[in-house]
Image (cartoon, rainbow, N blue to C red):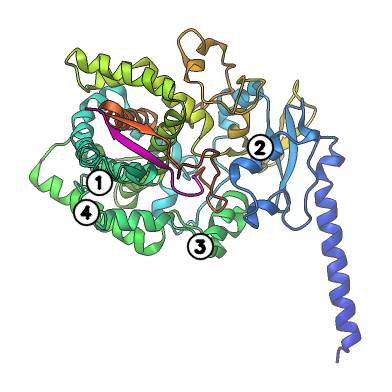
């Protein structure tokens, strides 16, 4: 029979062994002679994020601007116990994301394999299935398809115009992000699910309620997201999913209903549903386009597009409200278009230079995600050489992070980086932007497939909001933007209050 003393000795020995392992692991980059940021033995370099002391944007900025990282193309970190790499040099970023994409084709982030909708979506999907699905879906987001889809987008945007036209002048202070969230929901419901929900008239509709619930964070959801992005080995244990099961069932039910009705009636709307119907029951490389493979494309379009659309419009209006002279430039461009009798067509929206500059600058200051993640997918014994940037060789399975939010605020690449300056993206100045330093939708083969439709919807939203209205700051406006520390997206900490003033 084991005595208490022996039990204590076993526990003590185990703790010593564990401590030794963690300490040895923490010294990984020291042994490799690579600049690194000292890590907590338990949390790695994620302690402040785990404890909600830091938002993702501030965290990657801390890594990027750490004294040990200055003037270095790479810097080592630890995601919990696992060594990872922060890539800081634009040329090396392009090499990894474009030229050597096949060696970094997967995101490090993962979902529970049982989440068949999540793993079949383009955000979390892995090769080779990801490549097959991507190739099939790419033509659906071409400029020709966007032009065909535009009338559907424009019709839905009238809900926004009607809503802001009815705002009383005596009570015109609004949380602009709430408005843009309703707008984003209506557009995605129409384009990705073929539904007309009009959230402005029915803010309690089922689609809006379920969609927003999926983004509501609690302790369990935060743990699942942390595992998905930084500790994928735990994903099956914590059941990290793209959609919670009740919400997944809702999206399945809605998609199946619309999909079947559209096939029965033969109605053609030039939306994502029509495109998915054309792929139904086709197959390639073992991927059969049916069931959750099809459903995933609509659901992920919502998940990926909601924050990008709603936040980008809200942040753009927030910055324009703080700088009325810039807002006047954009409104003059909008008035010029309207005065020609062109109103809002696909060609006019996509050709408006100052509107495009405004959106680009907004995405620079407020990217949807603070970082891009990749995993080295090499042969078992293969290592990826970083020469001539570094003597370090990336081993198979190592996570690599591109700290885009920090790069966008580096004065080396963007002078006066914390100031909203759309002119930096003008035709005269955009060539001054160093290649690889600005990638709001990613670069290379893994670039966001929804860039065109997302940009189009954002531009249309800003166009309609400023066509007959001016946005102004008021006493409730937070002049120094703070981000939500509980969110993996770059979200405002609270409401963005602005006055929406009708111009007679």
Residue visible at 72% across and 39% down in the picture: 381
Tag 4's secondary structure? loop
Task: Identify the residue position indicated by label 1 in the image.
Answer: 193
Q: Is residue 482 shown left or right of residue 63?
A: left
Task: Identify the residue position indicated by label 2 in the image.
Answer: 61
Task: Identify the residue position indicated by label 4 in the image.
Answer: 202
Give the spatial CA distance, label 1 vs label 4: 17 Å
Tag 2's secondary structure? helix
Mark 1 or mark 4, which is nearer to you?
4
Q: Earlier in the sequence, mark 3 or mark 4?
A: 4
Q: Badge 2: how crowded within 10 Å, few (<14), some, or many (20+)?
A: many
Q: Badge 4: how crowded within 10 Å, few (<14), some, or many (20+)?
A: few
Q: Which residues are magenta?
A: 492-504
The answer to whether residue 251 is above or below residue 17 is: above
Give the spatial CA distance, label 2 vs label 1: 37 Å
Task: Identify the residue position indicated by label 3 in the image.
Answer: 218
Q: Looking at the image, which is closer to me, 23 or 453?
A: 453
Residue 264: image location, x then y, percent: 10, 48
Q: Give the residue at the far front of this rendering.
A: 170
Does the magenta run of residues contain 493? Answer: yes
Residue visible at 84% across and 75% down in the picture: 11
Q: Give the residue at the far left of this rendering.
A: 265
């Amino acid at each position: 029979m084991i005595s208490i003393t022996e039990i204590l000795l076993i526990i003590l020995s185990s703790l010593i062994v564990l401590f030794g392992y963690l300490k040895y692991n923490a010294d990984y980059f020291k042994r490799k002679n690579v600049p690194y940021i000292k890590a907590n033995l338990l949390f790695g370099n994620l302690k402040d994020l785990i404890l909600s002391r830091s938002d993702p944007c501030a965290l990657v900025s801390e890594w990027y601007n750490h004294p040990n990282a200055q003037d270095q193309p790479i810097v080592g970190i630890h995601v919990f116990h696992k060594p990872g790499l922060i890539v800081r040099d634009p040329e090396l970023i392009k090499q990894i994301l474009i030229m050597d994409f096949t060696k970094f084709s997967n995101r490090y982030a993962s979902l529970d394999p049982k989440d068949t909708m999540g793993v079949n979506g383009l955000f979390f999907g892995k090769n080779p299935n990801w490549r097959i699905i991507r190739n099939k879906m790419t033509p659906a987001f071409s400029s020709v398809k966007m032009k065909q889809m535009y009338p559907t987008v424009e019709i839905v945007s009238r809900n926004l115009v009607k809503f802001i036209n009815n705002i009383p002048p005596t009570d015109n202070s609004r949380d602009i992000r709430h408005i843009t969230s309703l707008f984003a929901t209506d557009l995605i419901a129409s384009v990705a699910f073929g539904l007309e929900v009009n959230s402005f008239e029915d803010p309690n509709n089922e689609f809006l309620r379920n969609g927003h619930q999926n983004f509501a964070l609690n302790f369990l959801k935060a743990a699942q997201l942390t595992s998905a992005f930084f500790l994928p080995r735990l994903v099956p244990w914590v059941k990290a999913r793209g959609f919670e099961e009740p919400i997944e069932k809702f999206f399945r039910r809605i998609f199946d209903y619309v999909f079947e009705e559209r096939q029965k009636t033969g109605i053609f709307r030039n939306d994502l549903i029509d495109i998915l119907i054309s792929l139904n029951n086709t197959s390639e490389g073992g991927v059969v386009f049916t069931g959750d493979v099809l459903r995933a494309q609509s659901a992920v379009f919502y998940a990926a597009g909601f924050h990008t659309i709603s936040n980008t419009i809200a942040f753009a209006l927030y910055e324009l409200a703080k700088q009325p002279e810039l807002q006047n430039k954009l409104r003059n461009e909008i008035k010029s278009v309207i005065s020609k009798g062109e109103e809002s067509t696909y060609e006019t929206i996509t050709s408006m230079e100052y509107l495009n500059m405004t959106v680009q600058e907004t995405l620079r200051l407020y990217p949807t995600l603070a970082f891009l993640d990749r995993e080295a997918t090499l042969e078992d014994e293969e290592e990826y050489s970083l020469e001539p940037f570094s003597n370090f060789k990336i081993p198979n399975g190592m996570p690599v992070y591109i700290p885009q939010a920090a790069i966008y605020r580096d004065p080396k690449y963007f002078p006066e980086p914390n100031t909203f300056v759309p002119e930096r993206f003008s035709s005269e100045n955009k060539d001054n932007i160093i290649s690889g330093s600005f990638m709001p939708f990613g670069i290379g083969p893994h670039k966001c497939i929804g860039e065109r439709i997302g940009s189009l919807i954002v531009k249309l939203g800003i166009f309609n909001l400023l066509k007959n209205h001016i946005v102004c700051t008021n006493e409730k406006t937070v002049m120094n933007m703070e981000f939500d520390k509980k969110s993996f997206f770059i979200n405002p900490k609270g409401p963005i209050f602005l006055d929406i003033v009708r111009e007679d």
